[in-house]
Amino acid sequence: MDNSQQCELETLKAKVFTVTYSAKDVILFALAVGFGADEECYDRHLRYLHEEHEEFEVVPLWGLALPFWAHQNGARPLLPPFPPPLMSHMGLIPQSHLREQEVDLQDYPVLHTFQSIEWHSPFPPASKDSSITLNLHPSFKSIQPKSIGTFVTTESIVVHQTTPICSIQSTALILGLPPDYVISHSAPQRFSNSWKSMTRTSEKGAVWMEKTQKINSNVALLYRIASGDTNHIHVLPGVTEKPLLHGLCTLAMAATFILQQIPDGTPKTLEGHFTKPVLVNDTIHIKVWKQRETLEFDFVVYNQTKGEVCLDHGYFALKRREECGKRSRL
């Protein structure tokens, strides 16, 4: 990598975005990913859903939404545009890593292929009358040109004051972008995010838990408002006959299902590969395998309507609440 390329990457990395959230924001997100819908878990879920609960806390899955709400200047938008400010600022690939400066990346389809989040500290809980502000530090972790296109992995480190809260990685495939157009890049891993669940489904053994769920017509609409991912494909039919469910919503719903089975668990790491779309009114089936003597889970989400896997190599690691230490309180 030459000096100009390194300079551009460092400049992008130096940009700091902020997210401000209230109790209403995090409660709405918890509702959007399934908390409060299961009568058997209702009382346990109130810690995420009732701002006056004595143990009220931010649902950890809220971290998945932060890149969509992040902004740089002025007050937080009431509803983010799409693409959101953080994604617009970074672009798909830094110009310094394109050999062909005239290439228009908008000519190529972009597929969200992988997502991970690793938690380091609990989110500070907002009270009824106050909000919390976090800083996001984005960077490009990997730019890998392949024959199918170019895989680009970005990372956002989320910090409250000086405390790391979580690290979020996302991989997108710029489909069909010729590898000769791109200069590869790879940065060292800061945290331990990796593709942990690579065992084939047929080798996982007996299923630990499973669930079938229809994606009602309001699910994508609710997740859109709660997460800040306002892409019109989740509201209006376009390339598909019905609106698309957010891949991150599918991932979060699977994680919520696992959390429901472990009342004293709190997340450490979550990741999954998106393989096929889910449409509104499709029916999904979540299968979960538990690794022995641990709180580590592999999972797969099937689209029963289409007869195909829509989320593969899912991995979710939890820890007991008593291992988490004293939680930050306002």
Image (cartoon, rainbow, N blue to C red):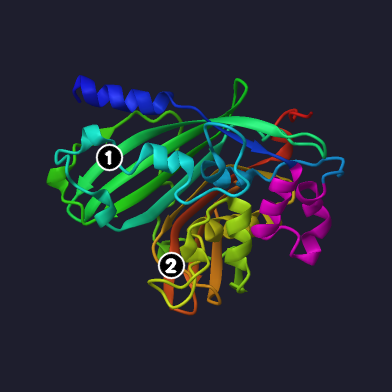
Relative to 273, 256 lies left or right: right
Q: CA distance from mark 1 to mark 2?
A: 24 Å
Quadrant where the N terminus is found in the figure: top left
Give the residue number, with chain letter if any, for mark 2. 277
| Residue 110 on image: x %, y % | 33, 55
- Does residue 198 appear in the picture of this structure? no
User: Crowdedness of circle 2 by 10 Å Cα count: few (<14), some, many (20+)?
Assistant: some
**Who's the residue at 49% across and 77% down the image?**
304
Residue 165 is marked as none
Q: Quadrant location of residue 327?
A: top right
- The single residue placed furthest to the front in the displayed view is 74
**Who's the residue at 82% across and 44% down the image?**
51
- Label 2 element class: loop
Relative to 227, 104 lies left or right: left
How many numbered callouts?
A: 2
Q: Is there a contact, CB below 8 Å, between mark 1 and mark 2?
A: no
Quadrant where the C terminus is found in the figure: top right
Q: Quadrant location of residue 140?
A: top left
Give the residue number, with chain letter if any, for mark 1. 143
Above or below for 311 versus 121: below
| Residue 211 on image: x %, y % | 61, 70
Q: Magenta residues: mostly which secondary structure?
A: helix
- First-in-chain label (1 vs 2): 1
Amino acid at dot 1: Ile
Relative to 323, 86 lies left or right: left
Range of residues picked out in magenta: 23-50
| Residue 246 on image: x %, y % | 51, 60
User: Crowdedness of circle 1 by 10 Å Cα count: few (<14), some, many (20+)?
Assistant: many
Please tell me whether residue 131 belongs to the stretch shown in magenta.
no
Please tell me whether residue 34 belongs to the stretch shown in magenta.
yes
